[in-house]
Image (spheres, coloured by chain):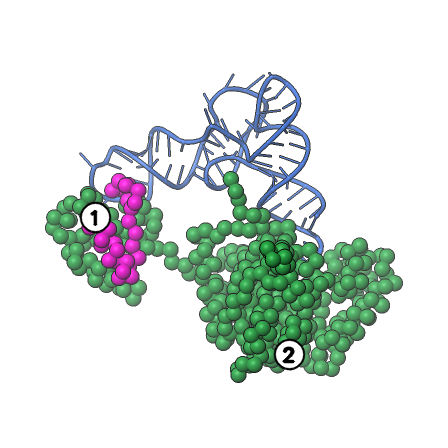
Chain colours: A green, B blue
Amino acid sequence: MINAPRGTQDLLPGVTEQWQYVEEKFKELCRTYNYHEVRTPIFEHTELFQRGVGDTTDIVQKEMYTFKDRGERSLTLRPEGTASVVRAFVQHKLFGQASQPTKLYYAGPMFRYERPQQGRMRQFVQFGVEALGSADPAIDAEVISLAMYVYQQLGLRSLKLVINSLGDNQSRTDHRNALIAHFAPHREELCQDCQLRLDQNPLRVLDCKKDKDHPAMATAPSILDYLNEESHSYFEQVKTYLDQMGIAYVVDKNLVRGLDYYNHTAFEIMSDAEGFGAITTLSGGGRYNGLVEDLGGPETPGIGFALSVERLLMALEAENINLPIDTSLDCYFIAMGEKAEQKAIELVYQMRKAGIQVDKDYQAKKFKAQFKAADRLKAKYVLVLGDNELAENIINVKNMENGEQESVEIDQVIPYIEQLLQRGQG
RNA sequence: GCGGUCGUGGCGAAGGGGUUAACGCACCGGAUUGUGGUUCCGGCAUUCGUGGGUUCAAUUCCCACCGGUCGCCCCA
């Protein structure tokens, strides 16, 4: 037997409805915010991610699905969405369009070669948005508010929004140097990972769980103290807008993003829900001024976020939220006898053309078993056509909820059902 | 990539070196020969993740691999 590859999953009826529901909701809310869908390829030139995401990141160093095609080109299954969207933005010169900023959303699978565990798949699905072309702190607030709104509209309550500012390049460099200077004397006392982090990305040392009690941690220089005037003021404005929208947040000066392209605003939304497991991050995002330029476009600021659908559904489950998904069936057609069976094929087709949801038996089941099947399918009405009915040119229509049954002329059955269904919805 | 743990029917699960592998749910059939959700009766794993080893004998012991799961790393 061949199973789905490690870290991938099949989504089957029963859960695909949930996926469809959250995807529809996400798209609906994006339209409310005037974001438009962009669809980019699932694989790209490897170089795009090396340059976009950053050569030193874990994603590029050890998590990419990279392969050579038959033309010896190095391609990579996309590990995230932003690089591709920015590439498309540059390639199609969307920066030249009349209406700016360019507000885009996407939904689709991403791929990272990691050890799977709950909430972490090798193929996973992200919904995300990118707003390109505006350096207004209000759009940072807009993007954050959209992310929060998606979760809230789906019913999640136990959410924690964490924000930070990584500052501009100058602020980051100053802070980085300060961090290295601060920790260098303690190098030998830090864990092995941190000794490496100190060279590659000293910001991460602050995030370490092993060394969190080291006295040097408490006195470490904070990025917030190294923000220059402009960066500081930008962050203050973002916070002010969030306050005005009534969106609660906590500032975490140790919040670090895993990708190199981020600067200024960084944020993460986490689940507070009981028993959610080790992974609590539902979505992450931030500003990436400079990325468009890095990928060959004009100097263009940008900000976006991505959320994991797998984790979103986990959060819904952790909070015991049932999405309003209707799994019922309008009608189930039961035919008894050869002639009735033939008539049934025709009538079922006509009903379907009239937009009525209907199914019938194809297993040669006994009459009683067909009723059972109708019950299991949550059919609202069962239509019975047998020799008796055929002789009288009628169909018996049974309301499965209250058990009442009425005889209807065959010609009238479609308008009759349509009327019943309307009343039911009314 | 590292460590813990687990792998028995469609699902949940008991068992334990020796020959009919419990039980529950689901499913199928019958009681009820054309009307569901209840009840009763019956049926339903040549087989215990895969491969190899030990043994007269392995689903049960050993090893490897694969997969799930939890944690680390990291992230969405």
Residue for point 66% across, 56% down: A63
Tell me the crowding category of disc 1: few under 14, some 14 to 19, or many 20 or more residues within 10 angstroms, Cα based: few
Residue extending farthest right = A185
Residue ID for mark 2: A298
Where residue A417 appears, as percent x and y from the top left, is 23, 59
* Left or right, residue A173 beside residue A398: right
Residue extending farthest front = A71
Q: Quadrant of residue A337?
A: top left
Cα gap from disc 1 to disc 2, whole angstroms: 67 Å
Q: Which residues are magenta?
A: A341-370
Local secondary structure at mark 2: loop
Count of numbered marks: 2
Viewer-proximal residue among B56 and A84? A84
Tell me the crowding category of disc 2: few under 14, some 14 to 19, or many 20 or more residues within 10 angstroms, Cα based: some
Kind of residue indicated by mark 1: Gln
Local secondary structure at mark 1: helix
Residue ID for mark 1: A342
Where residue A336 appears, as percent x and y from the top left, is 21, 44
Q: Is residue A262 magenta?
A: no
* Left or right, residue A190 beside residue A85: right
> Image height check: is A127 above or below A292?
above
* Left or right, residue A267 beside residue A173: left
Where residue A147 appears, as percent x and y from the top left, is 55, 69
Viewer-proximal residue among A193 and A254? A193
Of badges 1 and 2, the one in the foreground is 2
* Left or right, residue A135 beside residue A20: right
Viewer-proximal residue among A227 and A198? A198
Viewer-proximal residue among A112 and A380? A112
Q: Quadrant of residue B50?
A: top right
